[in-house]
Amino acid sequence: MTYVQVVLNGILLGGFYLLMAQGLNLVFGVMGIVNLAHGAFIVLGGLGVWSLYGAGVNPFLGLVVVMVAAAALGAFVQWAVIERIKGTAKQHELLTLMATFGLSYILINLGQQYWGSDYRTIDFLQSAVVVGPLRFSLALLVGVVLAAVITLGIAFWLTRTRSGTSLRAQAQSPLGAGACGINPRRLRLVGFSVGAAVAAAAGMLLVMTQPIAPQAATNFTIVAFVVIALGGLGNYKGAAVGALLVGVVQTVSGYELGAVVQAAAPYLMLILVMLFKPAGLLSRKASA
Amino acid sequence: MTDPTPTTDRPAGGSLVAGLMSRSRGPRHTGGRLPSTRSDVLQIGLLAVLVAAFLSWGLLGSLSQNQLAIDVAMFVALAYAFNIISGFTGYISFGQVVFFGFGAFATALLIIHADVPWFLAAVLGGIGGAVVAVPIGWVMLRLQGIYFALGMFGLAYIVSLLLSQWELTGGSTGLVVPGVIAQKPVLLGITGVAVLAFAVNAFMARSPFGLRAMAVRDDEQVAEAMGVATTRVKVVTFTLSALMPALVGGMVAYNRAFIDTSTVFNPALDLQVIVLVLAGGIGTLWGPLIGAVVLTIVSDQLASSFPDYQLALFGLLIVLVTVFLPGGIVSLANKVGWLRREIVRGTTDLPTEAELEKRLTAAHAHRSPADTDAELLVCRDVGVTFGGVQALREVDFTVRRGQTVFIIGANGAGKTTLFNAIAGVVTPSKGSIVFDGQPVVGGAPAHRLARRGLARTFQIPRPFASMTVWENVYLAALGGRHRGQAQEQAAWVVQVLGLEEIRFHASDTLAVGHRRMVELGRALALGPSLILLDEVMAGMSDEELEVVRDAIRRMPAFGVDAVAGIEHVIKAIVDLADEIVVMDRGATILTGAPTEVLRHPEVIRAYLGSGVGLGVGSADVPEDVTP
């Protein structure tokens, strides 16, 4: 029975990871860049909720606050940095990679100055839900429900609304989208700030279930990247598969083989999957 | 020879790094033998003066000055090491620190357990690092772009995690390395490594090997097709770029007297190196040096003034550089004409065409077609499917030595797919392709096929963007030739195709016709026995058409046994072709002499649709059909 419990926990964790990866996927989908500062947005969002909680603010209200703040910060970053990077497509890819890498260190460092390097968590919804012989943390369950709501919200936005459709059009062909009268600058701004807001939301859920600190940001960037890389970059359905897989593999390997393997698992998965399925698990053709 | 007209200095396109490279485009660069010796002496002299000045500053000063000098030398070495794999070869790595850590632990363990003198231990650690880099590179370099960057990051993380669990490496508490803290010898050692790293970069910047690495960076698939063994080039450059960090890591371990996994596998070290290289100018010879010296001293000041914000300041620096100075400090110097890439690899005066022709004909004499009419390429019943789409259904296609064959057919008929199958880029789902007596294996490294004598052009020209026209052609000519011979070959190609005037132009600034000409030039420079031309004449002026037609006529004299082309410009091929093959919806439907084929009703139908009143069967039809 414990094994079922471990796997189920892994699935719940996967739901989390999906949310963590959504923002990254969105930004990649819109701009074709991997935002290496994504993990920093997650961690700072979580720590923001932690501070607000300390000041007596309900975490759900805190969630709204940090999402708005992260959206604003994301918009600023897009406007002040990313949008100003020039060059051809490939140059641009390298430079944005570097710029977001630099950005992540700015955010991590500032976060460490403000919150210190201690790992912090909030004591909220800590009771357990017992279903027959299985026990689940309430925080984890609420987190997964929230993750599902946000994921579905994004899906709805992308497929059913005008701005979401424009966003997807821009992702597929910036030139064509421009020809249809879509303003790519504004769209990129929206994409990046929504990505940042979703990252911050993931941070709130994270801080309820595990201790986080600024220096863990890179780790979350990697996990989020592994999730979307497993599913194929920019592929929304693939990301869900990737998230569940990473969650389950991580909890099971942690249970079977210990904490070190658990920590190394996402990295190993990244390298192995990229070697054998470079276009993601859902890709039909395994290119060499 | 007149100077080519100066072109603008706008950044080039191309691969991740290519465009960031500063390099010459102007008339300054027409000159010099290969590579300009005066500039060599100048640069070596400059380097010697710099090293002497640096050592006298570092060795003679206070203890803290010694330490700062060690840091400067360390970052110079690391920056140049990073520049080899990421600047020249174009594979950005976020995890070169794994070799730094390897060297550090190997050296520490040798000193502790085997009592090896520190210098020897560091050298052994460095060699060990280079040795482990071979299998690591062989596996990891299959990843591309961001995947490679993050894959290396992950690898460093995993190795660090594992070593922190291992008792031999001191676990999470670390190792104390015995020995007196000797800064001056260590400074000499690390400076030596830095000079070595510079030398490797200088070699990369001007040797045929470096040219191959840059070809990998600009376009790996084309590099393969031009006979470059890309995997080998990548692994060798990766190994070189692992050697230096491992050497430095060992020396630093001895210098610091204490190491643990979190300090020697610190990803911030990689971050810092990336900043230095970017700020100086990635992919350039002097950029990493300038970046490392300037920024290490600046950061030393920053660290003592703002100890808590060092990482943030570095992050900010990266952001500023990417936004405001994407070419690095070197690009500033380039604007006033300093520090440009001094490698053109071409002489100012080309030997006359007649002379070259004489020499080359002599060189190719042994290959003259003794067995004309033998089958060179045989495709039988070839089919290719992509997912559910059948791109090729049934293709039978034979090219004999001495023949010039053109394939015509409507868009989507599968012509380029057929070429891709012949070149081994796509794997047929059925049928067989035999080139020169040996089967073509789909997915096998394309450079082997290129070395066996199969050259191709790409339908959309893909010149190596960061190279000049001459370098594009010369690179292809290098496949399996000595330098001198390759130069003659390239010089001949450049003249035959009328590219002399523009041979020192950056290939990404060319007009379409010239791009196609470069594409053709590269294929020709390979000296193939079969050359596949994928619509080389599309978009060319009548004048350029004549040049290409003339080149095709002269090919047999230079070892090209047969030509197979895809062409829409039918008027240009009627008198060139020995045979025309018509393809329609994934199958070859007709083969024969040009006049015969072009009058065939089936061809007219396939080309012009089956409409009535198109003069089907009448004698004066399609001489001029250009869809």
Image (cartoon, rainbow, N blue to C red):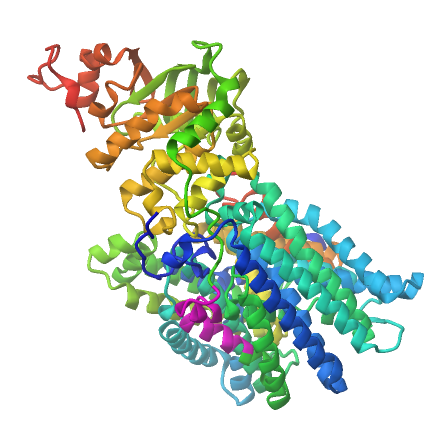
Residue B461: x percent and y percent? Answer: 35, 40
Q: Position of residue A184 (x, y in %)?
A: 28, 63
Vertical relation: B235 (above or below) A180: above
Residue in view at x 37 percent, y 15 percent? B403
**At x 53% / y 59%, what residue is drawn?**
B38
Relative to B490, say whether B214 is above or below. below
Whether residue B588 is visible: yes
Work out whether residue A280 or residue B293 is closer to the camera in this orientation and state it: B293
* Furthest residue toward left: B613
* Residue A51, percent from left and from top: 54, 85
Total residue callouts: 0
Tell me which secondary structure the magenta stretch mostly adopts. helix
> Taking B282 as reference, is B620 left or right?
left
Q: Position of residue B11 (x, y in %)?
A: 38, 60
The answer to whether B193 appears left or right of B237 in the picture is: right
In magenta, the rendered stretch is B314-339
B235 in the magenta segment: no
Q: Is residue A24 visible?
A: no
Which quadrant of the view contains residue A75? bottom left
Is residue B431 rendered to the left or right of residue B143? left
Q: Quadrant of the C terminus of chain A?
A: top right
The front one of B378 and B613 is B378
**Does the stretch in magenta take in B321?**
yes
